[in-house]
Amino acid sequence: MFLPQNDTSVTEKQEAEKARREGYSKIEQWTIEEIPGEIRGGVTISVQEIACGDPNCSPIDTAVAIMFPSGGRGMLGIPMESKDVTKEFLLEVFPTEDVLRAWSRGEEAEWPPLDDDDDEDFERPRLRFEAGQRVACRVGPDPVTGWATGSVIMLWYREPTWPANSWAPYKIELDDGRNIFAPGDVDQIIRAIDN
């Protein structure tokens, strides 16, 4: 039998949710402010926290997706909860202006840069999908219409500009021809579809 939550437990959960949402809001605002004004129009910023099951990383990462009207997009990861992110830390991991401009034109641009000393022996967690498998990926803010279908084309994708040992579980080619990556292996970001 389940016991009802006490008022303290409910209040703590409400305060934690409020802090998370406030964190999302400030990160979205700072991100918009850092995008050059002439390419800022129509940009969508999506901030979410992702649980990391790897014992070598932060238990909760904050993922920031920057999506331009051209279809160009990029993502950056911050190894902490959204409520703990400062503007200074965001700026340390923020893409360069050249990368932002490339994304705004719909071009792929590597961010963050790859290090030359990649640890190829690092054992990564097992993933739910295989290369070639059909999936639906979150590509927009709307939880119902913000999805696009495609096929997994690479496991453990990495861009040269990413920090050491930073990987996206999947690179996906969408049915419309765009290539994107999924920053986490969770149903809120990528899910199976029937063929």
Image (tube, rainbow, N blue to C red):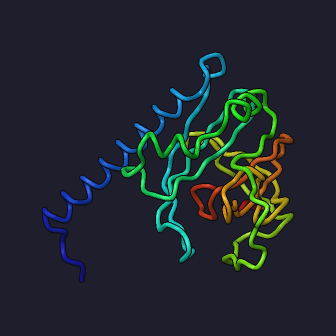
Residue 156 lies in quadrant: bottom right
Q: Is residue 186 above or below residue 101?
A: below
Q: Residue furthest bottom?
A: 1
In percent of the image, x 59 and y 41: which residue is there? Answer: 94
The answer to which of 194 and 106 lies nearer the viewer is 106
Q: How many marks?
A: 0
In percent of the image, x 53 and y 40: which residue is there? Answer: 91
Q: Residue furthest top?
A: 38
In percent of the image, x 64 and y 56: which residue is there? Answer: 183
Counting from the top left corner in percent of width and height, residue 134 is at: 80, 60
Counting from the top left corner in percent of width and height, residue 145 is at: 62, 40
Could you tell whether 154 is left or right of 43 in the image?
A: right
Counting from the top left corner in percent of width and height, residue 36 is at: 61, 22
In percent of the image, x 70 and y 80: which residue is there? Answer: 123
The answer to which of 54 and 46 lies nearer the viewer is 54
Counting from the top left corner in percent of width and height, residue 86 is at: 41, 44
The answer to which of 145 and 170 lies nearer the viewer is 170
Q: Is residue 176 above or below residue 98?
A: below
Q: Quadrant of the N terminus?
A: bottom left
Q: Quadrant of the C terminus?
A: bottom right
Could you tell whether 56 is left or right of 30 in the image?
A: right
Q: Residue furthest left?
A: 7
Residue 16 lies in quadrant: bottom left
